[in-house]
Amino acid sequence: MRGHREPFDPAYAGQTFISAKEGYDAARAVIYGMPMDWTTSFRPGTRLGPRRIREVSLGLEEYSPYLDRSLLDASFVDMGDIPLPFGNPERSLTMIEQYVGQWLDDGKFPLGLGGEHLVTLGVVRAVAKRIPEIVIVHVDAHTDLRDQYEGELLSHSAVIKKIAGFVDPVNIYQFGIRSGTREEFAWAKEHTNFHPFDVLEPLRGCLAQLEGRPIYVTVDIDVLDPAHAPGTGTAEAGGISSKELLAAIHAMKGLNVVGFDLVEVAPVLDASEQTQIVAAKVVREALLAFAD
């Protein structure tokens, strides 16, 4: 963990998320990248997501008219990308857990950029060891409840099922799901707080249950309809709009959110940049809503 107060890669100098100016010690929140797509099952490229989200963030305004807050008034540092070992998911997850654990121990709010969704497993391992009663809010097109994918136990399609091995499934809330096997849907209906197809209205219905509890929020960009976010490895028709996703982030303001990630942005699959642009805006709103 030496050097955790400096960007991981000097090449990222000048390529931080917009308005990230604080030094590590003074920062309330830490933005970091998890550039991994080692288990991608369809179209690769999400390891390039964190860098491009940062780059397009420069086109944002610092001010959020939704929240009447500005990034200029927020306290956060961009630590660059965790230097994950190419092709080694288990070691990558261990490194993610170690880095995020250090930041949590230092009292920081971790805001991660993926990367495939499996990276969230490393983050939640770190969070759950420090906050055993953690609640997971999972916003996604896919159930991510497979036991394995084509013989591989570690897969982005299995991340929530792996998390359910150490976080009680009754503390997992799933929204926007519209794809998975019959078995996954049946398991979710029996074990998790399962709200398929939509996000905002069912989330609003759960706010009273979530109030006061420590929450980790993980958002897969493919919860959006491909019309709003084509740049993702496993796009799924019938999704929500970017407006609904932003409203869902705002609806959770005031809850005890202790960490957040946004995953599965694959810039090479979206020459229009609309996926990266909406991802950057979601990050801005999450930072201002949660890392107060």
Image: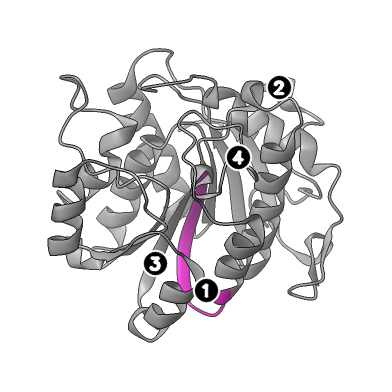
The quadrant the C terminus occupies is: bottom right
CB within 8 Å, label 2 to label 1: no
| Residue 229 to residue 209: above or below | above
Q: Nearer the viewer, residue 116 or 121?
A: 116
Q: Position of residue 90 (x, y in %)?
A: 28, 24
Looking at the rendered structure, the secondary structure element under dot 1 is loop
Looking at the rendered structure, the secondary structure element under dot 2 is helix
The quadrant the N terminus occupies is: top left
Q: Amino acid at mark 2?
A: Pro
Q: Is residue 257 magenta?
A: yes
Q: CA distance from mark 4 to mark 3?
A: 25 Å
CB within 8 Å, label 1 to label 3: yes
- Residue drawn 54% across and 21% down? 45
Q: Which residue is mark 1?
A: 252
Q: CA distance from mark 4 to mark 2?
A: 13 Å
Q: CA distance from mark 2 to mark 3?
A: 33 Å
Q: Amino acid at mark 3?
A: Ile
- Residue drawn 35% across and 77% down? 213
Mark 1 vs 4, N-terminal side: 4
Q: Quadrant of residue 205?
A: bottom left
Q: Residues within 10 Å of mark 1 (few under 14, many from 20)?
A: many
User: In the figure, is residue 187 to the left or right of 134?
Assistant: left
Q: Which residue is mark 2?
A: 10
Q: Quadrant of residue 186?
A: bottom left
Q: Which residue is mark 3?
A: 215
Q: Position of residue 214 (x, y in %)?
A: 37, 71
Residue extent of the magenta highlight = 251-262
Residue that protrudes farthest toward the bottom in the picture: 208
Mark 1 vs 3, N-terminal side: 3
Q: Amino acid at mark 4?
A: Arg
